[in-house]
Amino acid sequence: MDLIEHAEGIVVTVRVQPGAKRSAILGEYAGGLKIAVAAPPVDGKANEAIVEFFRELTGLKRSQIDVIRGEKSRNKLVLLRSISRADVERLLGLPLSDL
């Protein structure tokens, strides 16, 4: 899985599946994470659900997580500020290349 080094942290490529029963990582999709979220894809609710998902996963503050591309698409880039690649891999529980 590709993680992009950024001056402020790490950028994660995400494919969102809105309207799921619960939020969860479904696996890898096109070099990124496929994540199901319970929120519908309207009025930015799925974007907020992705931010909340990463907040809970990483323990970062809301202000440290942003959808920087793909606000109206299922394919998104999510910036996680002040976190290392190793920390992201550890929080997922395995090397990202093994997803």
Image (cartoon, grey):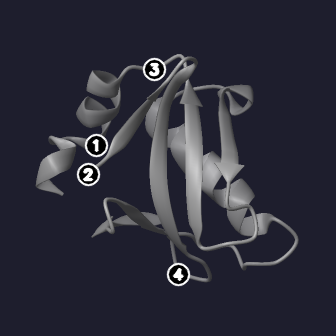
| Neighbour tally class for label 3: few under 14, some 14-19, many 20 plus, Cα within 10 Å | some
C-alpha separation, residue under disc 4 versus residue under disc 1: 21 Å
State the mark number for residue 1.
2
State the image quarter where residue 57 is shown.
top left
Q: Does the residue at mark 2 contact the one at mark 3 (Cβ under 8 Å)?
A: no
State the image quarter where residue 66 is shown.
top right
- Of badges 1 and 2, nearer the viewer stands 2
> What amino acid type should be assigned to the residue bearing mark 1?
Leu
> What amino acid type should be assigned to the residue bearing mark 2?
Met
- Of badges 2 and 3, nearer the viewer stands 2
- Of badges 4 and 1, nearer the viewer stands 1
Sequence-wise, the earlier of marks 4 and 2 is 2
State the mark number for residue 21.
4
- Of badges 3 and 4, nearer the viewer stands 3
Residue 47 horizontal/vertical position (percent): 71, 59
- Per the image, the residue denoted by label 1 is 92
- Of badges 1 and 3, nearer the viewer stands 3
Front in this rendered view, residue 44 or 70: 70
Sequence-wise, the earlier of marks 1 and 2 is 2
Q: Is residue 65 left or right of residue 98?
A: right
Sequence-wise, the earlier of marks 4 and 1 is 4
- Per the image, the residue denoted by label 3 is 83
Sequence-wise, the earlier of marks 3 and 4 is 4
C-alpha separation, residue under disc 2 versus residue under disc 3: 17 Å
> What amino acid type should be assigned to the residue bearing mark 4?
Lys
Sequence-wise, the earlier of marks 1 and 3 is 3
State the image quarter where residue 41 is shown.
bottom right
C-alpha separation, residue under disc 4 versus residue under disc 2: 25 Å
Q: Residue at the spot x=18%, y=57% of the render?
A: 99
